[in-house]
Image (cartoon, grey):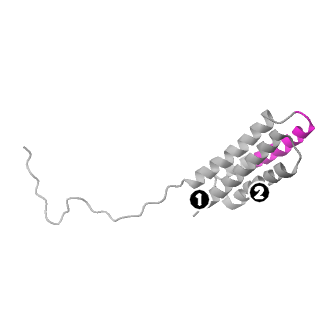
């Protein structure tokens, strides 16, 4: 048997701490960043593996590889202390540009699908990352 402990009346049995509101878990920003990186890396890999070897595929590979590299550099810069809005703007504009290239240029189906998918994912990632501020 244990001996009961006497507590003074002024000390509560459970310590009372002031209730501090918990901060929301940052989910949107990392997910948006992940979408931007995945779209740019996927597009770079698509230019190497999927695009045809003819002239159309060559120019589409140059164009999309350059856009994807710029977006990947912007995504890496989002993790630094640089201003976020211009970098998000570049990623969103690149997504819009890829969607427009896919819709209006007469490229093979593989190029069309790769540009459209990467553009939609880049644009969605930039919007989700930007919504993480609120």
How many numbered discs? Answer: 2
Give the overall secondary structure of the magenta segment: helix
Residue 16 in sight here = yes
Helix, strand or loop status at disc 2: helix
Residue at (70%, 45%) from the top-left corner? 39
Residue 31 as seen in the image, left or right of residue 106: left
- Residue at the farthest front position: 109
Q: Quadrant of the C terminus?
A: bottom right
Percent position of residue 106, x then y? 89, 46
Q: Nearer the viewer, residue 16 or 131?
A: 131
Q: Label 2 crowding class (10 Å Cα cut-off): few <14, some 14-19, many 20+?
A: some
In the image, the segment drawn in magenta is: 53-70
The reply to whether dot 2 and dot 1 touch (C-beta < 8 Å) is no
Percent position of residue 52, x then y? 86, 34
Residue at (10%, 57%) from the top-left corner? 6
User: Does the segment drawn in magenta span residue 56?
Assistant: yes
Residue at (14%, 65%) from the top-left corner? 9
Residue 97 as seen in the image, left or right of residue 16: right
Q: Which mark is residue 72?
A: none
Q: Which mark is residue 132?
A: 1
Residue on which disc 2 sits: 93
Percent position of residue 87, x then y? 71, 56
> Earlier along the polypeptide chain: callout 2 or callout 1?
2
Residue 5 as seen in the image, left or right of residue 73: left
Helix, strand or loop status at disc 1: loop
Task: Establish if 128 lies above or below 114.
Answer: below
Percent position of residue 34, x then y? 63, 47
Toward which corner of the image does residue 56 lie, by quadrant? top right
Residue at (68%, 51%) from the top-left corner? 77
User: Does the segment drawn in magenta span residue 22?
Assistant: no
Give the distance between the C-alpha atoms of the residues marked 2 and 1, in whole angstroms: 19 Å
Residue 83 in sight here = no
């Amino acid at each position: 048997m244990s001996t009961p402990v006497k507590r003074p009346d002024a000390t509560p049995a459970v310590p009372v701490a002031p209730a501090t509101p918990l901060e929301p878990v940052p989910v949107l920003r990392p997910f948006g960043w992940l979408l931007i990186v995945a779209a740019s890396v996927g597009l770079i890999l698509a230019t190497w593996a999927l695009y045809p070897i003819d002239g159309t595929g060559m120019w589409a590979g140059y164009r999309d590889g350059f856009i994807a590299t710029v977006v990947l550099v912007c995504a890496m810069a989002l993790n630094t202390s640089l201003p976020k809005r211009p970098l998000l703007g570049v990623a969103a504009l690149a997504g819009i540009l890829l969607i427009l290239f896919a819709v209006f240029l007469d490229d093979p189906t593989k190029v069309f699908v790769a540009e459209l998918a990467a553009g939609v994912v880049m644009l969605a990632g930039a919007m989700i990352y930007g919504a993480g501020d609120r």
